[in-house]
Amino acid sequence: MKFVNRTAEMERLDKLALSGRPGLVAVWGRRRIGKTRLLLEWCPKHRGIYTVADLSTEKIQRGYLAQSLNTRFPGFGEVDYPDWKSFFRALAREAGRNSWKGPLVFDEFPSLVEASPALPSVLQGFLDHEGREANLLVVISGSSQHMMQGFTLNPGAPLYGRITASLALSPMSPGALMEALALNDGVTGMRAYSFWGGVPRYWELAESFGAELDAAVEYLVLDPLGPLHLEPDRLLVEERPPAIALRPILDAIGAGAHRVSEIAGRVGVPATSLARGLTRLADVGLVRKEQPFGDSERSGKKSLYKIADPFFRMWFRVVAPHRAFLAAARSSGRRKLWEQYKNRLLAEAWEETCRLALPALGETGETLSGYGGWSPAGRFWGGSGPEWDVVARSQDKTVLLLGEVKWHERPVSEKDLDKIHSELLSKEQPRLAGSGAFKETVYALFVPECQPGLKRHGRSYRIVTAEDVIRALG
């Protein structure tokens, strides 16, 4: 699959490499997010060296890395370095002799530290002395966000304060997915994003299926022989330290338990014991905490926990509770099971993506621009009052936006839109702090696509389509 997106990250890395200054760069993000591909695309542009660690012993790891440096420094890998200090001294000596300033990438750095816990301290000394004198740019990368953040953000860690730049890679946008899979319309792009999310590795596996999304899901995920049939378990085991013990929390949320008390009841543990596990799952981007729009982040009374990643949501909704059935079923049976869940997954992902896109729609979307920009949107619920799919304030807090999100398998007609608008107007407005200060209320309808020729302008409500949302998110 061709390399797409990551423009801002590549520009940042290029600027660091071209500065000619020494330093330490940290790159992290969840597994499958594209860290290695980014570094492999960047390194050759600047005559850099890419190395990757494995799970072997310290001595063997050091030998493998020395062999990797042979491409730049012939004979470097023929020496047996007894410890990391001698390894880094030799590296600085060869770099200075050859006027080479890096970048030098240590991918999967947490694996090196697992085998040699003293390595961060040794690297600190190298960066402060020999590495600085040699003007070397060093990059450490890893999928264990827990460990990477501990190395660099913990005030007591040896590498704290040594970081020149840090790049936390997030899932990519629906627009990047469309480019990667060569999809031609926003509705198909939104469908694909609802299943694969923003994780490039999943796109790569689905690339050969093109727009045949149901076939891709059945072959890659539902079939017990598919490469993604056990993906969540693999990812949790590969975390450092392993996070497989948190699997029951994901099972509970995937089955429909969203409050802490409900999750605890499903898992069979006290609610007070879940805080650390939920925090860790949130840190790796698998779970998110949702609160009613306008509520303080410190308030936890109405908090809900949702599976944040679209692929994980699909897996825990469809695969996890039906493993026995999928193991025995034929392709036709797996497809029938998929049809039971597909539209609900589409609707959930579409609603989330509309909220995510709203601030950008205020800048790029014709139907929602002109209000001075929008704050991040949220969902509203509470008490016996109605729920609202999208709620946001203008940046100057004078305009309130209320939106309704609908997923339709066919292009919506004018009659459909008017019906949705009537339902929206019949609902009681959310009771927000300071709501009396709003000078105007804007109503928005989010639908995948409209019938050809339908006029979207000059209405009392704004119409936003999948094309608008994907364009806004880049």
Image: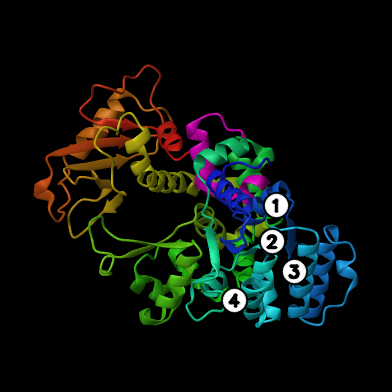
Tell me the CA gap for discs 1 and 2: 8 Å
Side (left or right) of 185 relative to 449: right
Badge 1 element: helix
Residue 394, quarter of picture = top left
Residue hosting label 3:
92
Tell me the CA gap for discs 4 and 3: 32 Å
Comparing labels 4 and 1, the label whose residue is closer to the camera: 1
Find out whether the residues at labels 3 and 1 contact each other: C-beta distance under 8 Å.
no
**What stretch of residues is rendered in magenta?**
182-205
Is 88 drawn above or below residue 354 in the view shown? Answer: below
| Three-letter residue code for mark 2 | Val
Local packing at callout 1 (Cα closer than 10 Å; few below 14, some 14-19, many 20+) is some
Find out whether the residues at labels 4 and 1 contact each other: C-beta distance under 8 Å.
no
Residue hosting label 1:
43
**Residue at 64%, 69% in the rendered image:** 238
| Three-letter residue code for mark 3 | Ala
